Amino acid sequence: MLATMMRNDVIIVGGGLVGMALALALERSGLSALVVDSADLDATLGSGFDGRASAIASASWHMLEALGLGPRLAPFGCPINEIRVTDGLSPLHLHFDAAAAGEPLGHMFENRKLRAALIEAGRDAAGISIRAPARITRIERGAAAVDVQLDDGSCHRSTLLVAADGRRSSIREAAGIRVARWQYRQTAIVGMIEHDVPHGEVAFELFYPSGPFAILPMLPGTRSAVVWTVAAADAAATLGLPARAIVAEIDKRIGGFLGQIRLAAPLSSYPLGFHHAERYTATRLALVGDSAHGVHPIAGQGLNMGLRDVAALAEVLADATRLGLDLGGDEVLGRYQAWRGLDNMAVAAATDVLNRLFAMPARPVASVRRAGLAMVNRLPPLKRFFMAEARGAAGDLPALLRGSLP
């Protein structure tokens, strides 16, 4: 007996932050979505699942508000009202202020709070079906449709498959899409600290030859997230230090400006690398988020790039629906590729160059870097350009990034 074929406008493989955001964006535009994930989504919400936090740029925050997530997320977010960028502890710096933008430059959230809000909203949405944990046993991308079978025997048909299944995307690999990739021989150590001096809603990015060191404001006002980049060869030894020694190392890198500090959560680590897909589309397939690209966390752009993919793809599909076009057709997917491919490549290249530039230890190079930061800080047009980039507010913005539905 043949299984009943269930139909959705789009099938999304991956129920992480980007996959669930896309499902919501499509549902708000009147399209139905099936989200399939091999993980138990509830297990990803535990406090010990990972120690990561994300800076949501102001444009990305507009999108989350437009999707109705503002009330769910607002109690857990800390606005970023200033960003200070320095070469080590040099007094020469680049300073961005929310007063110049007329709104916070971004908001900090624990990833599990973002994840919880997205999953709850997805479960509440009538146009979203979630199958997790579930394993895909068969995918057929044909000329007219995409057919997917799950391990429970259920069969699902759509006109478009979206891969949101991460940097090791099996969907991307099965489609034969090649990826440029390399490792940075760096590891990010992440965690939370408590400190005596309130952070004042200021984010600090301090650059050292071993990699950037970021202090990011969290709620309440004396808790901050730490993203500490170290040489990969030193990561295990650093994580093995006693808590007192780790605190001393953190304090040395930030120059003591937060007063006495202590660890507020266990540290975890993630190897750092770069990857970028040669293309974001194939027959009835689109890549979003980490399945398409992955960058150094030097400017906090990784998740925001994925959310910009979501906003662009949702708009492309909403426009196609209004025009009666095939959602998985070459014309529709070509528009998405053109919109996101060049922008993501430019951001990826910029983060790579910045990481390599600030890793040069020579004193003359450091002097040039510090002078460059100070110069940008004194030139309003240049400073506005970089601030718009940091806020995700530059370029051709989809409607969601401007705060409205497509």
Image: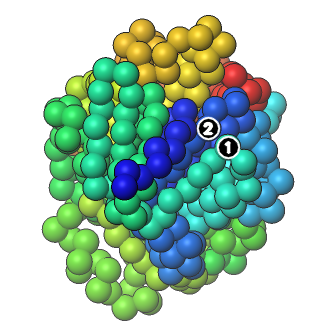
Dot label at residue 32: 2
Q: Quadrant of residue 243?
A: bottom left
Can residue 331 be spotted in the picture? yes
Q: Quadrant of residue 232?
A: bottom left
**Measured along the vertical axis of the image, is residue 404 above or below residue 74?**
above
**Which residue is at 23% across, 80% downward?**
237
Dot label at residue 56: none
Q: CA distance from mark 2 to mark 1?
A: 5 Å
Three-letter residue code for mark 1: Gly
Three-letter residue code for mark 2: Ser
Q: Seen in the image, is 147 located left or right of residue 31?
A: left
Report if the CB atoms under discs 2 and 1 are less than 8 Å apart: yes
Q: Seen in the image, is 345 located left or right of residue 109?
A: left
Q: Secondary structure at mark 1?
A: loop
Can residue 55 be spotted in the picture? no
Instruction: Kindly identify which residue carries mark 1.
Output: 127
**Which residue is at 63% across, 47% downward?**
128
Q: Position of residue 106 (x, y in %)?
A: 67, 43
Task: Count neighbours of disc 1 (C-alpha within 10 A) and say few if under 14, some if 14 to 19, many if 20 or more.
Answer: many
Looking at the image, tell me whether mark 2 or mark 1 is earlier in sequence order.
2
Q: Seen in the image, is 249 located left or right of residue 375?
A: left
